[in-house]
Image (cartoon, coloured by chain):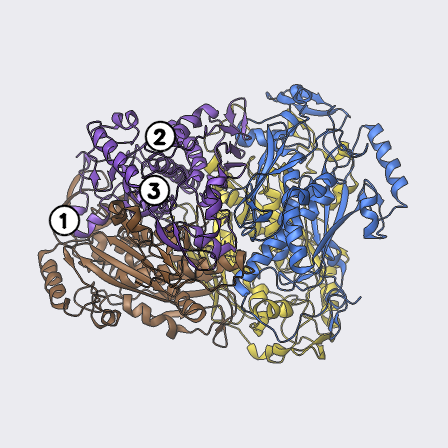
Chain colours: A purple, B brown, C yellow, D blue
Amino acid sequence: MSGSTFGQLLCVTNFGESHGPAIGCVVDGCPPGLELSEADLQPDLDRRKPGTSRHVTQRRESDRVEILSGLYQGHTIGTPIALLIRNEDAKSGDYAELADTFRPGHADYTYWRKYGRRDPRGGGRSSARLTAPMVAAGAIARKWLAQSFGMRIRGHLQQVGELVVPFESWEMVDANPFFAASLQCVPQLEAHLDALRRSGDSCGAIVRVVATKVPAGLGNPLYDKLDARIAYAMMGINAVKGVEIGAGFGAATEAGSTHGDELTPGGFVSNHAGGMLGGISTGQDIVVRLALKPTSSIRLPRRSVDLQYRAVKVATQGRHDPCVGIRATPIAEAMLALVLMDQALLNRAQNADVSHELAPLPGSID
Amino acid sequence: MSGSTFGQLLCVTNFGESHGPAIGCVVDGCPPGLELSEADLQPDLDRRKPGTSRHVTQRRESDRVEILSGLYQGHTIGTPIALLIRNEDAKSGDYAELADTFRPGHADYTYWRKYGRRDPRGGGRSSARLTAPMVAAGAIARKWLAQSFGMRIRGHLQQVGELVVPFESWEMVDANPFFAASLQCVPQLEAHLDALRRSGDSCGAIVRVVATKVPAGLGNPLYDKLDARIAYAMMGINAVKGVEIGAGFGAATEAGSTHGDELTPGGFVSNHAGGMLGGISTGQDIVVRLALKPTSSIRLPRRSVDLQYRAVKVATQGRHDPCVGIRATPIAEAMLALVLMDQALLNRAQNADVSHELAPLPGSID
Amino acid sequence: MSGSTFGQLLCVTNFGESHGPAIGCVVDGCPPGLELSEADLQPDLDRRKPGTSRHVTQRRESDRVEILSGLYQGHTIGTPIALLIRNEDAKSGDYAELADTFRPGHADYTYWRKYGRRDPRGGGRSSARLTAPMVAAGAIARKWLAQSFGMRIRGHLQQVGELVVPFESWEMVDANPFFAASLQCVPQLEAHLDALRRSGDSCGAIVRVVATKVPAGLGNPLYDKLDARIAYAMMGINAVKGVEIGAGFGAATEAGSTHGDELTPGGFVSNHAGGMLGGISTGQDIVVRLALKPTSSIRLPRRSVDLQYRAVKVATQGRHDPCVGIRATPIAEAMLALVLMDQALLNRAQNADVSHELAPLPGSID
Amino acid sequence: MSGSTFGQLLCVTNFGESHGPAIGCVVDGCPPGLELSEADLQPDLDRRKPGTSRHVTQRRESDRVEILSGLYQGHTIGTPIALLIRNEDAKSGDYAELADTFRPGHADYTYWRKYGRRDPRGGGRSSARLTAPMVAAGAIARKWLAQSFGMRIRGHLQQVGELVVPFESWEMVDANPFFAASLQCVPQLEAHLDALRRSGDSCGAIVRVVATKVPAGLGNPLYDKLDARIAYAMMGINAVKGVEIGAGFGAATEAGSTHGDELTPGGFVSNHAGGMLGGISTGQDIVVRLALKPTSSIRLPRRSVDLQYRAVKVATQGRHDPCVGIRATPIAEAMLALVLMDQALLNRAQNADVSHELAPLPGSID
């Protein structure tokens, strides 16, 4: 019931602040026998880490993860896996003047009201830096899901501000610094972000994540629907303001005769449901979309108040992503992986004895 | 950790199936001393219940709730409050032929894959009927929140299919069977739904819920953000496919200089954030939107398969809402109330000793 | 996290007060496909229920249980199983005068301090009557454990006051009203309890519970050891003041060379550990002992205070067990069953893929 | 719901193995504003650490704790507090030959059955070394409880094997390496343990822990009684086989007229209940006793089997406590502190609005 723990059987307890000595997490509940080392976690961490292109924050962190426990002879042994990442490039001086003002769009004011005090250095615990341990934990889940079901979880940037990025192929996603599934869009994206950076402003984004080879039967009727767990995970990512499953808000304007995915002996003929019905996975692809707000730290001066509620102007000079949505792709993938592994464990706890004469229907044959 | 329990300190454990003997819930963790009787719960139940107009399902249920425990001399005493609603108008015959087919868009297939068996009568546990206990539990939370903070939680129907319903006033919401905040739209809504019913099809909807007089400081940094808890609650409501906080998906196209709500000595000047920053409430109104898919039970014949995966046609004749989104309004209000009361209890557990010289900033002065 | 919910995957949420309309519980997480009806629960309820002999309280309750949900065609379907028992013989008048005094040894004072108010009728929620739903829920667990592993969980009364009851055979336990595993002791027990009842006093007891055919591997390293879960369950039973696993307090005076159970190719040669090592079951019998305090409701007058802390004398006239330990046997069995089923589900969630070339070692060959 | 997480609102997630890189824990839910540094944790860690006298294991660990998060300017800020202790004196070679045998009385066999593999170095996760993070976390709770209520939690060794140690004064406890509350017993204890060490055998012990200035009202009716939470905590400590609250097993032979603590205007006249009634604290001292089994690692050869179930002899040569009960005192204190702080937070979550005209009754005036 710790607010910093994610998951029910695969439990990830996150700790740390942006400019403290270290960040990390404890992953408890992982099945034993999974081959694992730091090398399994680093690639995902590297995809998320800052400073990889001029379009993201220039903070320099190697984000080297150390596994402190839970392994023996290169395999998990069923005990908690503690992951540690030291903070290296903590320039706390950047934030000195912010200690007694509340930056608009930031958690400064709410942390202060809730706790009576806050760590102003780099946003403290509200920093997107805390998504690094999520990504590391997610890499464990991805590996287990891949081995257990052949599952793959992939995301891509679907929209940056007004610029919609078409989907061309998954292969393109890791071949550009935007997680765009289209290489022909890259020059446009670069121009867009360069202009944005020059303007001192920021913009929002939409990310789409898809899981393939998901077993049917994950999730629960209520309240703990698979949809609900995914919404919780995604809305828990910094800056996310909206979550959709399948048709999402588009479902509002669909007719029942369109939205309800028909079944045939060859499988589902469409996937408006996004891979789940009644809170339980159908075996089709899981499709999730999330909207991220524009970065709150911008160079343009904005009105705010200080600790005595006196009017001040705030302009943020530090190192920031002009569009936090870009680096959100590996984070969203990681969170979806954590949800699905957790649900897979929960499902076999209750339903390991359920057997069927027939295999699951194939997913969409659309 | 029961999948059927909602909440962490205010815990609502839901039980029942559409055509079983009864539905209900156990509400644990309510503070003692709250004056309470069935009369506090019935009005919200009556707003949700079926058969109130020709535009919703014609199933006749009085939805009379009985409080079985947790009260003494008309007040809560800190022990679990069990709520019981007997099912009365269960016409199981309507569903006999559906027992060996999977209705498109329904949970029939997923329940069967997960559990190996299912109660086909009225959708069993996947029925929207199970939202009645949520509404009853939510009424307890609403009363406590109103007494503790003066909080009000109200919802309205914002869109039905393509038809957008403007917001005129809260007073209008309970003066029409659509939860529309506009009376001039009612004829259009009636015509729309009458046509829909005649066509044998169904449509989706969007509902908006607003909480006022929310104390600042509710929620947690991560993962258990207030946003995440709300998303979990809303996406756990039957048929919901999308959830937005504040600007929601619109945030993707906003600039940081627009989205980030400025603060002045007089308070926040806007509320794009929807009442929370960094996972914690600001004290502004909480604004949530949810998209509901079209009812899956429609008279139009659709392709499906039977238990042996042979092709069949399914047309649903039973009693169904042509737009489930209509009755979703009191449900969404109830779920938001449950989240906020839970978070209020959690917050004072940790932060009861936090004091401030200054009162919270006023909410949006926009 | 409801305080009234027991278990992590098999979750039992208990509700009710002694003289309210009803008591009951919701059992969530039971695997589907278990054949179940009220007839499976009633025998255990009948073993616990009051009024079965002159040695227990004369309150007359049929303790008929109604299953409200979670079944279809006589089998569990994976959804919550709600159990309802109406209170019938609630003589609240007996307690009228107790409403403004605190009975020594009772929860009157502590409930009042905690909640500011309490239901004084029959002890309200602190009544041993609330163990009835535990027993009903336990019967579900017993059935599942028996079918899954051939497990049996049996208890017997080992001591009443100073009178030690030897173990002769399990068969004798249900052939006398004391749950004594010795028939030759019965006349002594009757004489002891008759004298006690005449004296207006009460006495304590010790109960021993044994589970056989327990699979190896249940439990966790820390903190959630199997021992800890059992201690929690047993110490949560009304009136329990001590819990022992295996050698228990006797282990303090044992040498390591005696206590540590040796292993041979034929199995463990002894069972001082009581069936678990390092928090995890060995596959041997699980052996638990619990000590129960004497009934607090006695006819002998005792000193106490009223709600204004003025001195009063309290003598309880109602209907009470002179030794609550007697009826504790089926309760302890039920709680152990709930723990073991919960742990079996948890274990297969994490470790379903673990396989061994060798079968578990046999239990003690002593 | 992580098995490695202790507590509901004050959540301690423990990680590590005896010979891995590090051990530690994450403490989540601590109220903000508590002054805290490593200096607050080290004294308790030093009381528990190995190598402090010839009567305990000679493993040399400085047990220096590093606080990685959750602090700013020397105070807690409401976010998770991560504690790290590096393992320094890990002589894994000592255990090489044990990797393919199961030591009697150890968790070797059960870990292997459960997980299919295990870390044999120093017992891996089953090592008492993992109590160090519990003690560090407990020190945080002790500080908060002292500041909030003036609470003190102290333990002492009450029995070693057959040798009963009388209670003389709390002051003596920290003036000898046995946590004995009697200095005149020290020579006897030294002789006893020297003889034990020479014999190559080990012995059990009994520890008693007392909390003073406990507020009335902590705990819950059921199942989550204060007694149950304490039993869970104590039985979760390595080697514990029995737990008693107040009169404990002695209650079995007490009469109701003796056991039930009378109340007078001056307070309770006795404390057989050990400070709680009906699962809720009375405001009297909380008194808990725990029995610890003899150390399983002894030099005397014992029968066991290897991984192929072939008969072998095992004699443990490593560095071990001849009586693990000695170092258990600070551990039991820490666990009781964690329970009580957690319950204090839970209680104010639900009951912060409860007020009384009268102060709590004083504790025992005995």
Q: Residue at 79% across / 31% down in the picture?
A: D201
Q: Secondary structure at mark 1?
A: helix
Q: Determine the chain carrying the residue at label 2.
A: A
Comparing B172 with C24, the one in front is: B172
Name the kind of residue labelled 2 in the image.
Answer: Phe
Q: CA distance from mark 1 to mark 2?
A: 32 Å
Name the kind of residue labelled 3 in the image.
Answer: Lys
- The residue to which callout 3 is attached is B114
Q: How many marks?
A: 3
* Earlier residue among tags 1 and 2: 2
Name the kind of residue labelled 1 in the image.
Answer: Ser
Q: Is residue A287 above or below residue A145?
A: below
Quadrant where the image shows the C terminus of chain D: bottom right
Q: Is residue D306 visible?
A: no
Comparing C229 with A94, the one in front is: A94
Question: Residue A257, which numbered label?
Answer: 1
Question: Residue D153, which numbered label?
Answer: none
- The residue to which callout 2 is attached is A149
Q: CA distance from mark 1 to mark 3?
A: 26 Å
**Nearest-to-viewer mark from 2 and 3:** 2
